[in-house]
Image (tube, grey):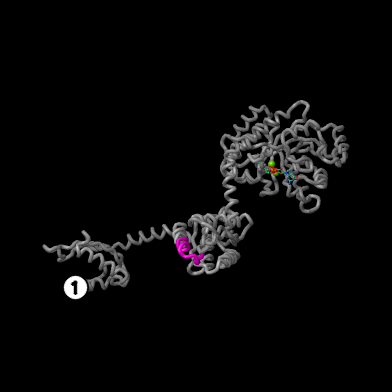
Amino acid sequence: MLGLQVEDLGTTPESWFGLVNRYYVSGLRQDLAAHLNGKTEQFESRYRIRHRDGTYRWVLCRGRATRGVDGHALQIAGTQTDVTRLIDVEERLIHDAFHDRLTGLPNRNSFLANLDRAVEISRQNSHYRFAVLFLDLDGFKAINDSLGHLVGDQLLASVSSRLRGCHRPGDLLARFGGDEFVLLLDDLGDFSVAASIAERVQQELGSPFLLEGHEVTTRASVGIVLSNTKFDSAEDLLRNADIAMYSAKAKGKGQVRFFTPDMYERTLKSWNLDNDLQNALQRGEFLVHYQPLVSLSTGRISGAEALVRWKRSNGEIVSPAEFIPRAEESNLILDIGEWVLRTACFQARQWSQPEMPLLTMSVNLSGRQLSRVDFLDIVLRTLADTGLSPSQLELELTETILMDSSRAAKAALDGLSREGIKLSIDDFGTGYSSLGYLRKFAFDTLKLDQTFVTDVHSDRNAAALTRGLIALAHDLNLRVTAEGVEETEQLRFLAAHGCDTVQGYLACRPVCAEEFTKLLFRQTALLPSFVPASLLEARGSERSPHRPSSEPRPAPGERARLTLVS
Ligand code: C2E
Ligand code: MG
Ligand code: MG
């Protein structure tokens, strides 16, 4: 076992102890003495002992003494087992329990144990200061998705080695999993050290990483919590550092934020929001507003977009931009979306009276709704229950939904258009603006995002793009709706370049159903009367292929009337 001959062993216990690694000698002596003195049933000790080749082995030594009549130990016999491999495995397990495999850094467990210790010291010593830095890489998911997990892993390992160079010797750097790293800055003389370490981190990560032939750039959002803020436990501190990191992320890439109590208040507010949203549907706190879509060939309302609102019990109206993303996270969007669809279809059916113009009702969809296996059934049942014709319903989808959509979602969209329900692509130009989607799915309408429309009359690039997109959409047999039209000049440009429909504050803001009914009855002119009749005549013949059957071709007299109203 030890590569020794019998004669090398010597005859005294001391010659044996001489082989044992000096750190373990006193433990071995104690274990032996305890047994010889009758304190233990059996002698057992684990220690490291020198092999003839100079390396050390882990051994487990066990024995039992034979005793004289007075109980005195006379001799001892037992076994010694080489447990080096066993201990190696054990040590690896202990190491793995406290370290991250990819980067070799301490992990969450290890970090929490150290943070607990720091919290304890700060309770006993009011002069002791420390800080926690919470780091999250910006855009890591996109790198992982586009360049693959191998590059993703290499990036994390490279980031960890750059971070190792940013802190002081006594600090603890750990990886929490994913792209999250934390630093415990121990025994800070001055809190400003935390800011300078965060700055060093940003500098270190500032230069690109060369991974598998790709030049990859990443930044980190950093949240810092100092030990002079109020906290009850290590978990509190960590949560606050995390909140500060989220606040940094919200400010953009590569930002650093110190935790402040009002950050916590805001986060608490958004947790409460989740809670309140859960109850809002039962309490009937949602309502739908409708925004007119105005046809540029007739000047009349040709449709409405249903836009959900949340009227909280305190009377505050919450914008969908604020609560829809949260409802999507909690899946509550499925119930809200179904309710909006039903309400809007019912309303559109109410408006489908002989004396009223025929309207298309546009309803926004969330990706979650589309991935429901029974989505098509829900839409068809809603149409059947409310009596609305499928051709009067248009569902709006954004490109992001299409990007994430599964095969089942594509089947649902195909099913919807087979049933005669229209589809429109919403906010076009804000996502990936992939024309591929326009061909892949059976869209009827392209909704040009407000970002195009805003500068259309003042910026040559925006003008050229908008002109080109309108022409292209028409080539693909799609109608074009311009969103967010606020100024007459924008309207003039859009009308001159063949846009079919406009939606925006210039015509009308979203209004409640009663207001919308008044607009329909009064046939109020919603747009300024600048569009020359000659242009309308010319466009009427040019664009006839994409006028939907639901919108009757205006009689010449009607077009003339548009130029007169003011
Ligand atoms: P969206 O579908 O692009 O709806 C148009 C948004 O632009 C509406 O905001 C509307 O009020 C606003 N808008 C219309 N004209 C103008 C204008 O001239 N200027 C400006 N600055 N804004 C204008 P809103 O109602 O706050 O809705 C925001 C977004 O929330 C919607 O964008 C849509 O993505 C989502 N949303 C609204 N209702 C629903 C819904 O029922 N379900 C789902 N999934 N999403 C909804
Ligand atoms: Mg929309
Ligand atoms: Mg839109």
Q: Tell me the amino acid under the disc marked 1.
A: Thr
Indicate the position of residue 278 as horizontal and vertical percent values: 57, 40
* Relative height, residue 360 to residue 219 (above, below): above
Q: Is residue 61 visible?
A: yes
Q: Is residue 498 magenta?
A: no
> Which image quarter holds the N terminus?
bottom left
Q: Position of residue 30 (x, y in %)?
A: 26, 66
Image location (x, y in percent) of residue 236: 51, 55
Give the magenta range: 119-129
Please tell me in which quarter of the rendered image ligand 2 is found: top right
Tell me the quadrant of the picture where the C terminus can be found.
top right
Does 383 sit above or below residue 201? above
**Whole-percent x, y for residue 454 in the image:** 76, 49
Left or right? Give the position of 48 relative to 293: left
Q: Which quarter of the figure has residue 356?
A: top right
User: Is residue 471 at all visible to an observer of this figure?
Assistant: no
Q: Which residue is mark 1?
A: 11
Q: Secondary structure at mark 1?
A: loop
Circle 1 crowding by C-alpha within 10 Å: few under 14, some 14–19, many from 20:
few
Residue 400 vs 181, above or below: the answer is above
Instruction: Report the front residue among 128 and 245.
Output: 128
Q: Quadrant of residue 254?
A: bottom right
Q: Between residues 133 and 331, which one lies in front from this camera angle?
A: 133
Residue 475 image-quadrant placement: top right
Name the residue nearer the viewer: 409 or 126. 126
Residue 126 in magenta stretch: yes
